[in-house]
Image: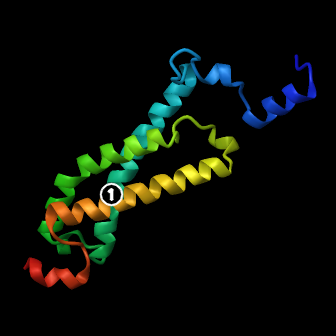
Amino acid sequence: MISTQNDYDKTRITGVKKEKIMNSKTGFLKGHWRNVAMLLIVYDIVAINMAYFMGLWLRFDCKFSTINPVYLTAWEKFIPFYTVFCLIVFWRARLYKSLWKYASYSELMHVIAASIITGLFHTVFITILFGYRSGRTNAHRLR
């Protein structure tokens, strides 16, 4: 039973007491929340890979046959590193330790920061590793 107004506010805001979500000794998620985090990681792996591929597909007028093989090769070689990097950034930004039902300004800032970091990583390393960007202005050099 809730004894004070302050306890009621904490329960209402967080939905679940922190002790039930986090292991106090290790700082890792416990039980159900660990399973939720794992499902979110699997979802992010699929979403990262599909978003990158769908970007290529849309870039080439939604026709798989018109995607230059150079871009597909770059996607195949770069996506494992990019996926792992994104997952590390998301984990460090504590995106898997939040209760999204009660997301606040701080979670928004974590999402924005993680998006900027992963976007910059993608832009810089795809250019460095493959020596080109995927714009139309460079397409004539690849043929």
Left or right of 104 in this view: 4: right
Q: Residue at x 70, y 42 (%)?
A: 102
Would you say 43 lies left or right of 10 here? left
Measuring from the top left, give residue 8's x and y in whole percent. Answer: 86, 28
Q: How many marks?
A: 1
Front residue of 134 and 126? 126
Indicate whether 32 appears above or below 61: above
Q: Quadrant of residue 89?
A: top left
Q: Mark 1 is on which residue type? A: Phe
The N terminus lies in which quarter of the figure? top right
Res 57 visible: yes
Placement of 20 over or under 127, stated as above or below: above
The structure residue drawn at horizontal position 71% and vertical position 27%, both measured from the top left corner, is 16
Residue assigned mark 1: 121
Look at the image and tell me whether residue 53 can be seen.
Answer: no
Q: Residue at x 41, y 56 (%)?
A: 117
Q: Secondary structure at mark 1?
A: helix
Colour convention: rainbow
Could you tell me residue 115's position as x and y percent? 46, 57
Residue shown at 31% from the left, 59% from the top: 122
Residue 126 picture location, percent across and down: 23, 62
Residue 143 horizontal/vertical position (percent):
7, 79
Most foreground residue, 114 or 1: 114
Q: Crowdedness of circle 1 by 10 Å Cα count: few (<14), some, many (20+)?
A: some
Of residues 128 and 11, the one drawn nearer to the viewer in this rendering: 128
Q: Is residue 138 above or below residue 20?
A: below
Q: Is residue 128 above or below residue 68?
A: above
